[in-house]
Amino acid sequence: MAALPLITPLPTRHPQSCASLSLPLFALLNEILPPPPSLTLSIGSGPGLLEATFLSVYPHRATTNPTSFFGVEVTSPDSRLVNRYLPEQNSLVVSGTWAVAREIKEAEGLVFVYPRQKGLIGTYLERGARVGVVVWIGPRCDEEEMLGPLKEWGAEERVEGRGELVEAGERVVVFWRRPGVQEEERMVDRI
């Protein structure tokens, strides 16, 4: 695996990560994502820099058995070229940008890192009956389009006052499953 960068309290851009990285961002993720052994999927992990660095800062999330934190990325002819940072035991691949990891059935937390398709967000939410919290990290210019499915699904939590999480052109948004959403999904499954 490639060497991880030093993470500081100030958001810093790294060439192998869409999102800027900071200690306050990782502290937020550690605080709100379900604790191990609950499963969390990070969708759009790319080379896995954000996920691997997060796990290096909070190693208890990487060492659980079974593994409780996975980065999910689209496969390539040689998947090792896609994932340069995340340990194999914490990495999942899917067949295309439309595909959903089968582990969604067990996931209780989701992180979307610069997603390209709002339909994929909706599909993960539909199939993730156990998901209780979702974190979206992306450019501010994508908020209006990408957050639609999340606003229908859950209640937004303000994350201001936690230090600088990401750079000025980016945003971190947390959504908690709205009461009744899971029950409605179960009713639909029974019909």
Image: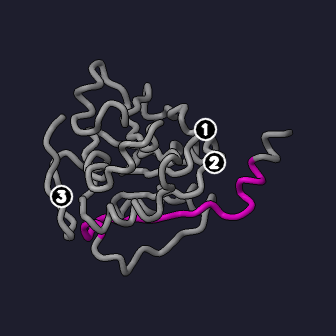
Image quadrant containing the N terminus: top left
Which picture quadrant has residue 160? bottom left
Which of labels 3 and 1 is toward the front?
1
Q: Residue at x 66, y 64 (%)?
A: 178
On residue 130, which mark appears? 2
Rendered-image quadrant of the C terminus:
top right
Q: Residue furthest bottom?
A: 161
Q: Identify the mark at residue 178; answer none if there is no mark.
A: none
User: Contact (CB < 8 A) between labels 1 and 2?
Assistant: yes
| 95 relative to 166 in the view: left or right | right
Secondary structure at numbered mark 2: loop
Whether residue 155 sits left or right of residue 76 in the image: it is right
Residue at image location 19% in from the left, 70% down from the top: 10
Magenta residues (range): 165-185
Q: Is residue 119 magenta?
A: no
Tell me which corner region of the image, top left, top right, bottom left or bottom right, holds residue 166.
Answer: bottom left
Measuring from the top left, give residue 68's x and y in whole percent: 46, 43
Q: Secondary structure at mark 3?
A: loop
In the rendering, at what x and y percent does residue 15 appear? 15, 48
Between disc 3 and disc 2, the foreground one is 2
Residue named by callout 3: 13
**Residue type at tag 3:** Arg
Which kind of residue does numbered mark 2 sit on? Arg
Q: Which residue is mark 1?
A: 105
